């Protein structure tokens, strides 16, 4: 059965939007690959810098972020080191899977991050198993999030508690 798609907007706008989103997706994919390489380099160099930072990995991430951003007009890593820490932790989760960088050609960092979390919380056998599911299903990172971490509907008590809290918080 063939489904008919009716577009409600101008065909020229459709073409322009699709061209721009394709360019954005390609740029994001390229940026993700570079950040992945940065994270791998930072992870690989930690052991030789561990003594300088007295084992304080967060201080190491902060310094690496500062150096990475030095001279850039727009920072790619947060000054807190948290962005780099997240990338490094996800990259470390895939260190036994050297082809992980290739996954960034088909998916995103968010996919890899959700897969890491699913494995850590034992909702998937491994990050790779979670990624296999995502690729087989053509799932977005949000789809993965919903699959592995479904949001449960609030119970009647939760609804009552929320309503009571709202009432008590009101200024009369």
Image (tube, grey):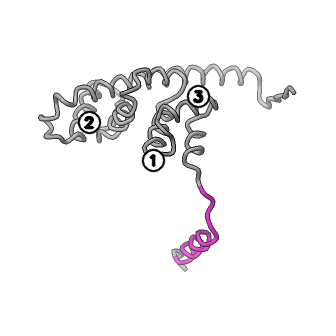
Question: What's drawn in magenta, residue-wise?
Answer: 152-168
Q: Mark 1 and 2 residues: CB-CB less than 8 Å, in contact?
A: no
Per the image, the residue denoted by label 2 is: 61
Dot 1 alpha-carbon crowd within 10 angstroms: few under 14, some 14 to 19, many 20 or more: few
- In terms of image quadrants, where is residue 139? top right
Of callouts 1 and 2, which one flags the residue occurring earlier in the amino acid sequence? 2
Residue toward you, 110 or 136: 136
Q: Which residue is mark 1?
A: 121
SS of the residue under disc 1: loop
Classify 153 as above or below 1.
Answer: below
* Left or right of residue 160: residue 67: left
Residue 102 position, x and y percent, is 47, 20
Looking at the figure, which quarter contains the N terminus?
Answer: top right
Task: Determine the image quadrant of residue 163.
Answer: bottom right
Residue count near mark 2 (Cα–Cα under 10 Å), binned few <14, some 14–19, many ≥20: many
- Is 99 part of what is drawn in magenta? no
Q: Could you say whether the residue bearing mark 2 is in a helix, strand or loop?
A: helix
Residue furthest toward the front? 125
Question: Looking at the image, is mark 1 or mark 2 nearer the viewer?
Answer: 1
Q: In the rendered image, which residue does mark 3 sit on?
A: 135
Query: Which residue lies at the image location 49% right of the left edge and 39% below the top edge?
Result: 125
Quarter of the figure that contains the C terminus: bottom right
Q: Is residue 111 left or right of residue 82?
A: right
Q: What crowding class fits label 3: few (fewer than 14 Cα within 10 Å), some (14-19), or many (20 or more)?
A: some
Mostly what secondary structure, the magenta segment? helix
**Upstream in the sequence, badge 2 or badge 3?**
2
The image shows residue 46 at horizontal and vertical percentages of 22, 30
């Amino acid at each position: 059965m063939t489904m008919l798609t009716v577009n409600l907007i101008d065909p020229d706008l459709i073409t322009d939007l699709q061209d721009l989103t394709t360019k954005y997706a390609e740029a994001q994919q390229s940026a993700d690959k570079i950040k992945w390489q940065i994270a791998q380099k930072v992870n690989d160099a930690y052991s030789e810098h561990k003594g300088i930072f007295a084992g304080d990995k967060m201080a190491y991430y902060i310094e690496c972020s500062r150096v990475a951003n030095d001279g850039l007009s727009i920072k790619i890593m947060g000054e807190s080191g948290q962005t780099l820490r997240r990338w490094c932790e996800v990259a470390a989760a895939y260190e036994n899977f050297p082809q992980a960088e290739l996954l960034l050609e088909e998916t995103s960092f968010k996919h890899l991050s959700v897969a890491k979390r699913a494995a850590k919380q034992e909702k998937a056998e491994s990050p790779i198993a979670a990624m296999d599911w995502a690729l087989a299903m053509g799932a977005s990172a949000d789809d993965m999030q919903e699959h592995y971490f479904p949001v449960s509907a609030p119970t009647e008590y939760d609804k009552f508690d929320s309503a009571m809290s709202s009432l008590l918080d009101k200024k009369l």
